Image (cartoon, grey):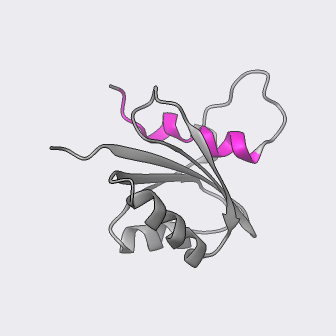
Amino acid sequence: MEKSIMYVGLDVHKNSIEIAFAEGGRDDEVRHYGKIDNSLEALDRVIRKLLSKGCELSFAYEAGPCGYDIYRHLRSIGLDCTVVAPSLIPKQSGNRIKNDRRDAKCWRVCIAPEN
């Protein structure tokens, strides 16, 4: 039996990370997980909670000034991670106000394969 994939989107800032996830493909509901400190220890706690659901994890976040520490860390522990160029992240028309929760949810179009 093949494990289902949980797609996890991160909106990374200097002091915090906003997290959203979907337990299936592109059309599944994206849920907001919450905001955590921008530390690898806090991220590891979230990873343990998400792995306990029995899904394979696939992460994505927007490239930015915070560097690639999160990418390297996730890859070093065997998890899939994609860093997406800001220009490739789709924007909904009419959503001109920057919103961290919305940013964390929009990653899935970039990494989730079409069914």
Report x, y in % for residue 48.
44, 67
* Left-right relation of 97 to 42: right
Residue nearest the observer in this picture, 77 or 71:
77
Q: Is residue 65 visible?
A: no
Q: Quadrant of the N terminus?
A: top left
Residue 85 lies, with reference to residue 80, above or below; the image says above
Q: Residue at 50% of width from left, 50% of height from top?
A: 8
Q: Is residue 39 magenta?
A: no
Q: Quadrant of the C terminus?
A: top left
Report x, y in % for residue 4.
30, 43
Q: Is residue 108 magenta?
A: yes
Q: Residue furthest top?
A: 93
Q: Give the residues drawn in magenta, as a range.
A: 100-114
* Left-right relation of 90 to 4: right
Residue 89 lies, with reference to residue 94, above or below; the image says below
Q: Residue at 56% of width from left, 53% of height from top?
A: 61
* Left-right relation of 82 to 9: left
Q: Is residue 97 visible?
A: yes
Splitting the image into 4 quarters, where does residue 30 fall? top right
Residue nearest the observer in this picture, 91 or 58:
58
Q: Residue furthest left?
A: 1
Residue 58 lies, with reference to residue 88, above or below; the image says below
Q: Residue furthest bottom?
A: 41
Report x, y in % for residue 81.
43, 57
Q: Residue at 61% of width from left, 40% of height from top?
A: 105
Magenta: main secondary structure? helix
Q: Residue at 60% of width from left, 37% of height from top?
A: 106
Residue nearest the observer in this picture, 30 or 94:
30
